[in-house]
Image (cartoon, helix red, strand yellow):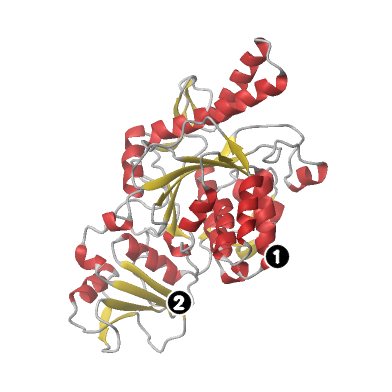
Amino acid sequence: MLVALLSVTVLVCTGYAWHSISDLRESVTQLSGLGLGGGGDGATDILLVGTDSRTDAKGNPLDAKELRWLRSADDVATNTDTILLIRIPNDGSSATAISIPRDSYVDVPGIGMSKINAAYGATREHVRREAVESGKPEKEAEDDGTKAGRKALIDTVSNLTGVRVDHYAEVGLLGFVLLTNAVGGVDVCLKNPVSEPLSGARFRAGKQTLTGPKALSFVRQRHDLPRGDLDRITRQQVFMASLAQKVLSAKTLTSPSKVSELQRAAARSIVIDDGWDIVRFVQQLKDLSGGNIKFSTIPVITEHGWSEDGRQSVVQVDPAQVKKATENLLKSDKDKSKDAERGDYIVDVTNGGTVDGLASNVSNILSGKGYQRGKTATAGTNDLDSVIVAHSKDDAGARKLAKDLGGLTVREDKSVPEKQLRVILTNSYAGPGSPADPTNEIAQTQQNGEDVNSAPGGNRSPITAESDGPMCVN
């Protein structure tokens, strides 16, 4: 997953022995023959897959203790529980991760219409069985099947989204646990308490720090959630955002023991394609900040669809809508800034009240509207009502920002640089991104194929790895 690669980036961001990243490159499992690359679109497009495999990246079975950690039996499966398409511009300035629901009903090469999470496993088993029947040794047949399964998933995602995949990375269940433990756990926030036996999810409401098996239960639960797998995707996204923030934090970057543990976890957990120059890639990402890591989801028609034979509950998607939405989501921030006036202004946002995550929420929304992202902070204020502070109270950008935030007052302060605006939010704020905003649910039920997290033109906050605390979810 994205965080697995971010953990590798940490090794470059620190002064921690440049030879270590070279050692890591040699120790990470590499794949060949996947037919990747050739997009030539100014960005690196990565397919990141989380599998439910009960083996490590080297193909070694997990021991009994590790299986207990994962609440797994000793069976071997190859379905893809998490599918993410990530675009990183060649300048390494941002990362946009798009989730594809595992039950999306799509055309799989060689199979036909099927749930996308079966593209890997069903193709793998079909090719393996044919190879065995033709007389190939079991190990060779297994390798052929696994390679074919990965290729089928890559082609399926490419056909669905219209994006040429440049690189492939795969992380199993154990890798998720090891990477989470390596950073000392991840902060999450739940709206309500949870007790669900199938996933082992038992959590109180509110903020909490999760490690290992508990973290895995948090991102795997889909039963007893209002929108099933779509709510699980939202959980995965906020978890990855929080974990990415942890990986990029100073406490991780300055801890040789955590960096070393991340290296060991990545070496045992990650599978990548052999055409990927991981050293060059992490150099690309060394200046990546949490606010520039964004998560979204492909458009969905309904999560209550049925397969053609009427036997399976599926998530219905429209490939044309997915291609269009993916194209829009993967555009650079510069391309999205169609309103030059908004794009000329840097906006800092301060949460002067007691609403958790308010500054980050509003900052994300303003960034989506075209403003340049400034600093976010939580600090006390003497203001009773929310206010915008600008170099001039007549500044056109300040007036537009005031309108965008529901009619705030603009206060003049000559110490504020021109083309920079400061938003101070108090508990009385009821504009976009506030608890009073009816469109600010992170994962509302979508209508007419909207993105489940941030429909274009709406006020719903995109999920990012910003540092103002985890978003509370179902």
Which residue type does callout 1 highlight? Answer: Ser
Q: Which residue is mark 1?
A: 257
Q: Quadrant of residue 17?
A: bottom right
Say which residue appears at 42% left-offset and 56% top-offset: 92
Taking the spot 26% from the left edge, 85% from the top edge, the residue there is 411
Residue 469, given in percent of the width and then of the height, sits at 53, 68
**First along the sequence among labels 1 and 2:** 1
Residue closest to the eye, 203 or 138: 138
Which of the two residues, 11 or 67, is positioned nearer the viewer here? 11
- Disc 2 packing (10 Å; few <14; some 14–19; many ≥20): some
The numbered dot on residue 106 is: none
Q: CA distance from mark 1 to mark 2?
A: 29 Å
How far across and down, in percent of the image, does residue 421 sit? 30, 77
Q: What's the mark number on residue 377?
A: 2
47 to the left or right of 144: left
Residue shown at 43% from the left, 54% from the top: 95
Residue 355 image position (x, y, % from top left): 47, 73
Q: So how many labels did they put on this image?
A: 2
Front residue of 191 and 7: 7
Check disc 1 and report its element: helix, strand or loop.
helix
Name the spot of residue 155 as percent of width and height, x first: 45, 30
Question: Are discs 1 and 2 less than 8 Å apart at CB?
Answer: no
Q: Extreme right residue here?
A: 64
Residue 64 vertical placement versus 4 (above, below): above
Q: Is residue 275 above or below residue 331?
A: above
Report the front residue among 393 and 166: 166
- Amino acid residing under circle 2: Ala
Element marked by disc 2? strand
Report crowding for label 1: few under 14, some 14 to 19, many 20 or more residues within 10 A (C-alpha).
Answer: few
Q: Quadrant of the C terminus?
A: bottom right
Determine whether, in the image, residue 103 is placed left or right of residue 390.
right
